[in-house]
Image (cartoon, helix red, strand yellow):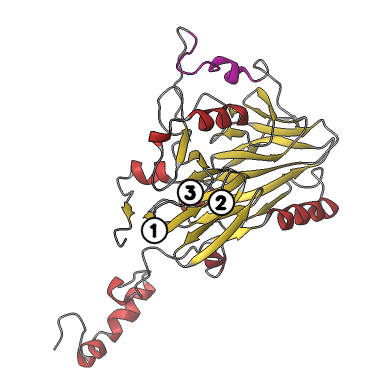
Amino acid sequence: MSKTEPSSEREGQGSDFYEDVKRQHLAPLWRQRRRPTHGRAVPHLWKWPMLRAEMMRAADVVSTEDIERRVLGLMNPGLEKEGIFATTPNLVGAVQLILPGEVAVAHHHTPAALRVILESERAYTCTDGERCWMEPGDVILTPAWTYHDHGNEGDKPALWLDGLDAPLIQAMDTVFFERYPGQTQQPQQELHEASVRRFRVAGMRPAGYSWDKTYSPLTKYPWRDMVQALNEMPAPEASEFDDLRLEYFNPHTGGPVMPTIACYAQRLRGGVHTSRHRHSSVGIFYVFRGSGHTVVEDERLEWSAGDIFVIPGWHWHEHVNAASREDAILISYTDEPLLKSLGIHQEEADGSS
């Protein structure tokens, strides 16, 4: 008789036991169906022309006067099958739209968020009293429990990619939300783009400056600085897996921008084909410039400027920019800091070649 499988006689003798423990809201774990430790999320790509068209249709359906935010979530097909409405188990991606003259009211919540700006002319975000303009390619932080509102003072639609750790916070049953007391917009308390000015020169900050929060004191990471840094990055610093890759970092600690979310920009030079690897952290990618494809396991994701795609955790992947001259730039965010803080982040190179 196997030591791991009870005989039919023992199973029969335990029938009363199983009924009793069920009534007591107990569960014998040895009878539970084993689930895979990973692999529920699947790779997927959302094309920008489709996303933009659906967002503009949403503008005909709902107004920011009627709803908190006009947002379409990027739902992972693998997670949707299980009733989980997220892009990855810990992170969600969503596209948000505000039309000229609209305001998205001030609120705060426990999920941490960042914005990757897709289209904007004279649209802004105000985070804890600091207002900053949104330009395509900018990364803007709205960390956990910081008040934030958005407005569009231009004459064209403003769209951006929202990245939040909402699935993680929801799984911990700690989602809290409040509107700004008594007002649609919060008062501006800082100079315009004050944090950008404060850290304008790399490696320097105001003398005597202090910061006691767990997230970056820099609200906006301008796209111009990102592109310049990638263009000036020494070729020997290139990674065989990501080519030229830089991290948006907390200038106070040198760590990730927020405790649960890291953000990266990478430049795939013309003709590059990266080596294959995998890691337990996920990646949600926005194609800022260029075109190419990413192979995730056996699936080929053909991407071009504006597209968004997801690489789930522990999936083999490689990036290809077949263009001979034009570089591609990808902006991504990941749950890597969360996994590293728990001591469970894993990474592996493909040794088959």
Name the element at disc 3.
loop
Q: CA distance from mark 2 to mark 1?
A: 18 Å
Q: Is residue 75 visible in the rendered structure shown here?
A: no
Query: Which residue is disc 2 drawn over?
Result: 92
Q: Secondary structure at mark 1?
A: loop
Name the residue rendered at 46%, 65% in the picture: 40
> Cβ–Cβ below 8 Å for labels 3 and 1?
no
Instruction: Pick whichever, 172 or 252, lies toward us.
Output: 252
Residue, x 51% and y 66% (percent of image)?
299
Comparing marks 3 and 2, which lies closer to the viewer? Answer: 3
Q: Residue at x 42, y 56 (%)?
A: 313
Report the predominant secondary structure element of the magenta stretch. loop
SS category of the residue bearing label 2: strand
Q: Position of residue 305 (x, y in %)?
A: 65, 48
Residue at (56%, 17%) from the top-left corner? 200
**Numbered marks: total:** 3
Q: CA distance from mark 3 to mark 1?
A: 23 Å
Q: Looking at the picture, which amino acid does disc 3 mark?
A: Val
292 displayed left or right of 1:
right
Disc 1 target residue: 314
Give whichever of discs 2 and 1 has the lower sequence position.
2
Tell me if mark 3 has few (under 14), some (14-19) or many (20+) residues whose alpha carbon lies within 10 angstroms of its own.
Answer: many
> Residue 272 got which mark?
3
**Closer to viewer: mark 2 or mark 1:** 1
The percent coordinates of residue 163 (x first, y second) are: 57, 45
Q: Give x and y (percent) for residue 147.
A: 62, 31
Amino acid carrying mark 1 in the image = Trp
